[in-house]
Amino acid sequence: MKTPRLPVAVQQAVMRSLRHFLQLASDRLERPFAEPALVYQQRGTAAGTAWMEKWEIRLNPVLLMENQQAFVDEVVPHELAHLLVWKVFGRVPPHGKEWKWMMQEVLGVPARRTHKFEIASVRAKTFPYRCGCQQHHLTVRRHNRVLRGESEYRCVRCKSLLKPGDYSPS
């Protein structure tokens, strides 16, 4: 899937948000932080990810275009908080007490772990599989592994082998 071209105004709004929250953190923690790189290459249903070692924030361009203000207000500070926590506290749980503190007390943003964006536009195609107790949906990658005979998958509930097709209760 080709990454959509982001309008300059959207990129500028994201950068303003990043710089605003970075300045807040620098002021409140009384120490400077380098500006992380912004990369618009996040795929799938994740709105963004923080790459600590690269000091980089990756944003999903499709979800960004569909939820511009929420990205500026919530996603950018969420990912920045991960980087700041890593710099200040080192390796800690991703959404632990340090991250919550950074979000709420330092950046002044509610600490929510996940977004509530509509994801139909970024959801991957799935293939129906069935077991003895329910319907399953396998990703393209898993479906192709089944077709090539490289993998087989079992239901975690009933332990039976998944088979292509729709489930119909007996």
Image (cartoon, helix red, strand yellow):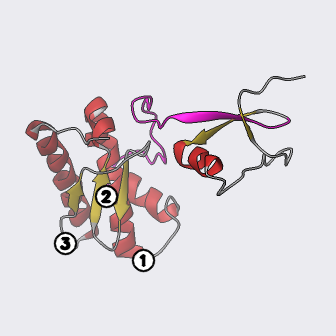
In the rendered structure, find residue 32 and report the number of the disc placed on it: 3
Q: Position of residue 18 (x, y in %)?
A: 21, 53
Quadrant where the N terminus lies? Answer: top left
Residue carrying label 2: 80
Task: Identify the magenta region.
Answer: 105-132
Residue at left offset 16%, top offset 50%: 15
Q: Element type at marker 3?
A: loop
Under mark 2, the amino acid is Leu
In this view, the residue in front, 125 or 23, is 125
In this view, the residue in front, 120 or 118, is 120
Residue 106 appears in the rendering? no
Q: Position of residue 36 (x, y in %)?
A: 22, 64
Residue at left offset 36%, top offset 60%: 50
Residue carrying label 1: 90
Left or right of 112, for residue 169: right
Q: Element type at marker 2?
A: helix
User: Which label lies toward us, 3 or 1?
Assistant: 1
Q: Label 3, label 1: how many angstroms apart (C-alpha)?
A: 16 Å
Q: Is residue 26 magenta?
A: no
Q: Position of residue 57 (x, y in %)?
A: 29, 58
Using the image, determine if residue 161 lies above or below residue 28.
Answer: above
Quadrant where the C terminus lies? Answer: top right
Task: Evaluate if marks 1 and 2 touch, with contact meaning CB atoms under 8 Å apart.
Answer: no
Question: Along the polypeptide, which appears first: circle 3 or circle 1?
Answer: 3
